[in-house]
Amino acid sequence: MSVIVFAETRDQQYKKSTLEAVSYGKEIAQKTGGKVIAVSMGNASDPSLLGNYGADEVITLHSDTFSAFSPEIYAAAFADICKNLGGKTIIISNTYSGKSMAGRVAVLLQAALATNVVDYPDTTSGFRIKRGVFSGKAFAYVDLQSETKVLAITPNSVEIKTYGTTAAVSAHQPAALPASATRIESTQTVSGKVPLTEAEIVVSAGRGMKGPENWHMVEELANSLGAATACSKPVSDMHWRPHSEHVGQTGITIKPNLYIAIGISGAIQHLAGVSSSKVIVVINKDAEAPFFKAADYGIVGDALEVLPKLIQAAKTATAG
Amino acid sequence: MKVLVCMSVVPDTTTKITFTNNDTTFNTQGVQFIMNPYDELALTKALDIAEPVGGAVTIIHVGTADAEPAIRKALSMGATDAVRINAAPTDAQFVAEQIAAYAQDKAFDFIMTGRESIDYNGGAVCGLLGALLGIPSINVITQLSVTDKTAHLERDIDGGRETLTCSLPFVASAQKDLCEPRIPNMRGIMAARTKPLQAVEPIASANHAVYSRFELPQPKQGVRMISADNPEELLHLLRNEAKVI
Ligand SMILES: Cc1cc2nc3c(=O)[nH]c(=O)nc-3n(C[C@H](O)[C@H](O)[C@H](O)COP(=O)(O)OP(=O)(O)OC[C@H]3O[C@@H](n4cnc5c(N)ncnc54)[C@H](O)[C@@H]3O)c2cc1C
Ligand SMILES: Nc1ncnc2c1ncn2[C@@H]1O[C@H](COP(=O)(O)O)[C@@H](O)[C@H]1O
């Protein structure tokens, strides 16, 4: 009855979403019994630290092929170890890489699959999960009926819990892996920046910023708060910002603790992607902008005038 | 060249989402259904690759006959023919199993899906199909070209982008930057009327998941306004009241 967690890394460090996934696994194991086993593929600097977040054991798998991420190879190796360990509940982060392997893992284990999971399951009778649907406009409760379940947990959905323990680490040999049909030619990552989908604070701006030349203020505010930056669809359509920053119904759905929307009107398609944010701040020069209805805090004013003052205040506040 | 493009049919993006029957059923009253926006990109890219080499692009949809206007739109964009698996889908796994059963023996050079359907947002069909058919799956691609049985792709990864190659066949899911969606022209719309749209009965498939209930997000308590001259107060509230910084 073990709960198996896929421990995703970036630059050999466990991501915040991985710690959430381990804590999530622990919560389930406490209800359904069984151990929490974290599986770490490739090189991670300190596997034993996952114990502090609820892992009873950590299994590390090493292979040269793991240096490049291939959903087929990762899913094959991970599903194989899940089978060997008798894992019935499989936890993966709902990140780009996590989501791209979750479906394959579910097929290999003949499991039920639920992506976009935003809360702990209800196991009082059966196994009922809560997932985001209609791009954040609603939630669905879904009963997973197969004995084995693969859950992909949306980052920033559950709290990280600590237990003050370390986990036993053992290295396993991966099963014979298929040759990958894909070959990675090059990877470009923006280092030192929080990825949007995992950020706790997001500073986002729209057409009200007037032009890309004003975005340095958005970035400065984001930097002073340790936030990621995002934008509305027209802003990325006009190439003021890269499309990877576009949030909303046809962009990325996010749920940070704090979403600051500057010069964004609050169209239904935009709100869809951000309304799960815990706290929303809206800055808009139009007091009638629809976004204020979805906000917790609001400032009516010209962004180009408010931002310098806000940046100053944020720098003072975060320095103290 | 033979390409298969999977399409879902979803509520128009302006739809106000509501539920009926004690929140167990999505209320389709007055809702306009459209071709999933990401699938327009998937189809456009497939056409751009197949047309110059005289290839064929088949559209596949798992769903009821209500979807036929949306399928005709895909045909009017340029798809060669369409297949509808005649079943109301229960979840992404059901959809993927139906499509895999159809595609199994048809030797498609590659298969395209959208990044996610904007109704149930599973983002799952691409990976499921890859595993069911035993071929590579490449999610959220922003570039694709095919030369000599090799595909050159770019995909979004967490915090960046990756360039890769892949041998055929494979399945990939379309992300926003892939291309601009084609707008059907008059000739396309006329031609679509007579293009083949075949209905196929579903295979038996296990039901892994049952949607039991829906819920709308909690409405906000009301907005607290702060003077534009006092951003310090905003930061103070965010730190001490909301506790988010
Ligand atoms: C099929 C479809 C899908 C879509 N998907 C998305 C999506 O995923 N995400 C998305 O964001 N949109 C999406 N949209 C577009 C959406 O409908 C809106 O058009 C868009 O969100 C508006 O962007 P905006 O708020 O930046 O611009 P605008 O609507 O132009 O709003 C600009 C706002 O800035 C304010 N403003 C102007 N000047 C200033 C200033 N100096 N200081 C402060 N405030 C100022 C104005 O009062 C206004 O409220 C979609 C639309 C369609 C049809
Ligand atoms: N009912 C369906 N019929 C055919 N293809 C579908 C269907 N549902 C989803 N898809 C495809 O799978 C993609 C991802 O959908 P999903 O995994 O449901 O988010 C969509 O963009 C479509 O390409």
Image (cartoon, coloured by chain):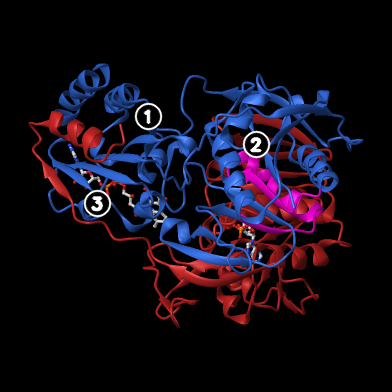
Chain colours: A blue, B red
**In the visual, does B134 lie left or right of A301?**
right
Which stretch is magenta?
A: A86-114
Residue at the spot 52% in from the left edge and 60% down from the top edge: A130
**In the visual, does A72 lie left or right of B154?**
right
Per the rendering, the mark at residue A291 is 3
Hey, which residue is sitting farthest top in the picture?
A319
* Quarter of the image where one finds residue A227: top left
- Label 2 neighbourhood size at 10 Å, few (<14), some (14-19), many (20+)? many
The first of marks 3 and 2 along the sequence is 2
Per the rendering, the mark at residue A55 is 2
Hey, which residue is sitting farthest right in the picture?
A176
Residue at the spot 63% in from the left edge and 68% down from the top edge: A126
- Label 3 neighbourhood size at 10 Å, few (<14), some (14-19), many (20+)? many
Per the rendering, the mark at residue A227 is 1
Q: CA distance from mark 1 to mark 3?
A: 20 Å
Report in which chain the residue with disc 2 lies: A
Q: CA distance from mark 1 to mark 2?
A: 29 Å
Report in which chain the residue with disc 1 lies: A
Task: Tell me the quadrant of the picture where the C terminus of chain A can be found.
Answer: top left
Q: Position of residue A107 (x, y in %)?
A: 78, 55
Q: Amino acid at mark 3?
A: Phe
- Label 1 neighbourhood size at 10 Å, few (<14), some (14-19), many (20+)? many
**Could one spot residue B80 in this view of the protein?**
no
The first of marks 1 and 2 along the sequence is 2
**Same chain? Circles 1 and 3:** yes
